């Protein structure tokens, strides 16, 4: 996509860029019903659409399709922008364009989400767009939940269910050197080779203990019993429990 000069029949190198003052003036005229001003706004913000769709370049989607969908988001942003609020158009327009593209990707996704979850998600997205149109900012999860009168968790689950999948090979950083992908940032700190080896070594060391020593360590460290409680159950003194526990631990350390 980065090397493509023409997209949807438009030469991207010749896209016009409007100044902030020009944009606001055209927006005011558009609100008054000036269709020519609306067309100028659309053509003058196509570079904004182009910059947004580059964020989705690694999804395997056709660039022309994404550009057309992004233009729909741009038109919606123009039609719903509130000129009375002190907000830059790009601040409002970019989330609208991204939202339209994400909706397109969700509708064409091979992943299947339950109808009830999808319905909740669309209600959340509609409430989000309505809130943005009124306040010119993104709502919080709590604000969306309050608007829809549903639990905060339901909002989170619904949004998570329709999130676009990310490839493990998608680059997250590239600055003149080796590219860092998502898989480079994902780490399982629990199921590592080291933890498996430690688990095996510990199990073998435990098996070398006597049944009484294994029972005492199980009560002490797996069930959280005190030495007095262990002494009562095993039928020995607390001092004997302490000595057996200490010897067993030292033997495990030696075997490992």
Image: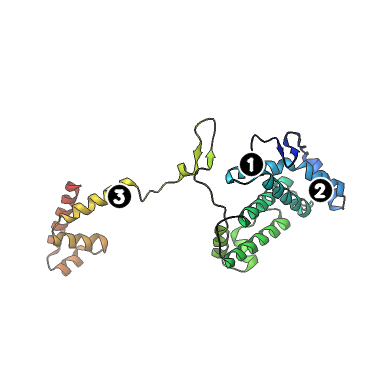
Residue drawn at the location 17% of the way across and 69% of the way down: 233
Whichever of labels 2 and 3 marks the residue nearer the N terminus, that label is 2
Residue drawn at the location 69% of the way across and 41% of the way down: 50
- Mark 1, residues whose alpha carbon is within 10 Å: few (<14), some, or many (≥20)? some
- Quadrant for the N terminus in the image: top right
The residue under label 1 is: 54
- Residue 55: x %, y % from top left: 61, 43
Query: How many angstroms separate mark 3 from mark 1 (CA)?
Result: 42 Å
Find out whether the residues at labels 2 and 3 contact each other: C-beta distance under 8 Å. no
Is residue 62 shown above or below 152? above
Disc assigned to residue 196: 3
User: Would residue 51 appear left or right of 228 to someone viewing this image?
Assistant: right
Mark 1 or 2, which is nearer the eye?
A: 1
- Residue 227: x %, y % from top left: 19, 63
User: Would residue 125 appear left or right of 232 to someone viewing this image?
Assistant: right
- Mark 3, residues whose alpha carbon is within 10 Å: few (<14), some, or many (≥20)? few
The residue under label 2 is: 27
- Residue 234: x %, y % from top left: 15, 67
Mark 2 or 3, which is nearer the eye?
A: 3
Q: Is mark 2 on a helix, strand or loop?
A: helix
Would you say residue 170 is visible in this rendering? yes
Q: What element carries label 3?
A: helix
- Mark 2, residues whose alpha carbon is within 10 Å: few (<14), some, or many (≥20)? many
Query: How many angstroms separate mark 1 from mark 2 (CA)?
Result: 26 Å
Would you say residue 88 is visible in this rendering? no
């Amino acid at each position: 996509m980065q090397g493509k000069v023409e997209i949807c029949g438009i030469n991207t190198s010749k896209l016009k860029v409007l100044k902030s003052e020009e944009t606001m003036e055209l927006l005011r005229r558009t609100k008054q019903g000036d269709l020519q001003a609306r067309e100028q706004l659309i053509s003058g913000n196509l570079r904004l659409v182009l910059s947004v769709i580059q964020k989705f370049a690694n999804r395997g989607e056709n660039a022309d399709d994404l550009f057309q969908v992004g233009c729909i988001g741009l038109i919606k942003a123009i039609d719903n922008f509130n000129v009375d609020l002190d907000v830059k158009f790009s601040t409002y327009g970019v989330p609208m364009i991204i939202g339209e593209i994400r909706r397109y990707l969700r509708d064409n996704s091979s992943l299947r989400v339950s109808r009830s979850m999808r319905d909740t998600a669309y209600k959340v997205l509609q409430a989000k767009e309505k809130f943005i149109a009124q306040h010119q900012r993104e709502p919080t999860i709590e604000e969306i939940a309050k608007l829809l009168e549903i639990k905060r968790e339901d909002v989170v689950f619904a949004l998570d269910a329709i999130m676009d999948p990310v490839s493990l090979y998608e680059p997250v950083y590239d600055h003149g050197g080796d590219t860092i992908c998502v898989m480079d940032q994902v780490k399982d700190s629990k199921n590592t080779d080291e933890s498996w080896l430690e688990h095996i070594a510990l199990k073998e060391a435990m098996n070398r203990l006597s049944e009484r020593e294994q029972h005492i360590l199980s009560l002490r460290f797996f069930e959280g019993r005190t030495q007095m409680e262990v002494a009562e159950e095993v039928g020995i003194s607390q001092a004997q429990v302490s000595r057996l526990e200490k010897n067993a631990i030292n033997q495990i350390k030696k075997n490992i």
